[in-house]
Image (spheres, rainbow, N blue to C red):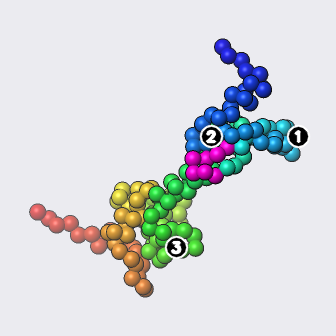
């Protein structure tokens, strides 16, 4: 079993690549409010950004990039651009409300939708492409309209 002293561990970490980060050098230590001293590292991300990261965050995989990975993943999930808080369209808000009414038992409207088995198709619920699929199927919401479920009394079965 290899036991490393603090100095040899510090030397060992230099040049190591962890996730998208390459360790360049030791950075000034971080001192917590309780007085605990924690080692920080200067790292270079695969995108070229240089930042400082705590040793524990690096070793445990809590920090895996400069933030570019998270931004990249977020852009893959929301390609339509209509879901950001400041740009929510009426169509996007209708889609959100539909999911809430049908899928969230804590919603005040759930008793009139989800509780009586009004459901949303899996394609519209998909975390990555749900809204895009909804938009392809339904199109933009026309002004002055709402999205509502079909009342059970209006469902007519075709006797054969």
Viewer-nearest residue: 126 or 13: 13
**Residue 85's spot in the image, x, y percent?**
57, 70
What range is drawn magenta here?
43-49
| In front: label 1 or label 2 | 2
Which residue is depicted at the point 68% across and 32% down?
A: 13
46 falls in the magenta region: yes
Which residue is depicted at the point 73% across and 39% down?
A: 25
Quadrant in the picture for residue 150: bottom left
Quadrant in the picture for residue 28: top right
**Residue 145's spot in the image, x, y percent?**
41, 82
Residue of label 1: 35
Which residue is depicted at the point 87% across and 41% down?
A: 34
77 falls in the magenta region: no
- Count of numbered tags: 3
Viewer-nearest residue: 19 or 93: 19
Residue of label 3: 88
Q: Earlier in the sequence, mark 1 or mark 3?
A: 1
């Amino acid at each position: 079993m290899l036991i490393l002293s603090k100095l040899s561990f510090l030397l060992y970490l230099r040049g190591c690549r962890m996730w998208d980060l390459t360790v360049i050098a030791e950075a000034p230590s971080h001192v917590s409010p309780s007085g605990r001293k924690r080692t920080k590292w200067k790292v270079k991300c695969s995108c070229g950004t240089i930042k400082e990261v705590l040793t524990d965050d690096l070793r445990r995989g809590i920090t895996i990039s400069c933030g570019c990975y998270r931004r990249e993943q977020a852009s893959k999930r929301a390609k339509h651009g209509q879901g950001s808080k400041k740009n929510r369209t009426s169509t996007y808000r209708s889609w959100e409300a539909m999911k809430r009414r049908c899928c969230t038992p804590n919603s005040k409207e759930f008793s009139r939708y989800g509780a009586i088995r009004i459901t949303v198709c899996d394609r519209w619920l998909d975390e990555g492409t749900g809204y895009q699929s909804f938009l392809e199927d339904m199109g933009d919401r026309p002004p002055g309209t709402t999205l509502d479920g079909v009342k059970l009394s209006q469902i007519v079965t075709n006797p054969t």
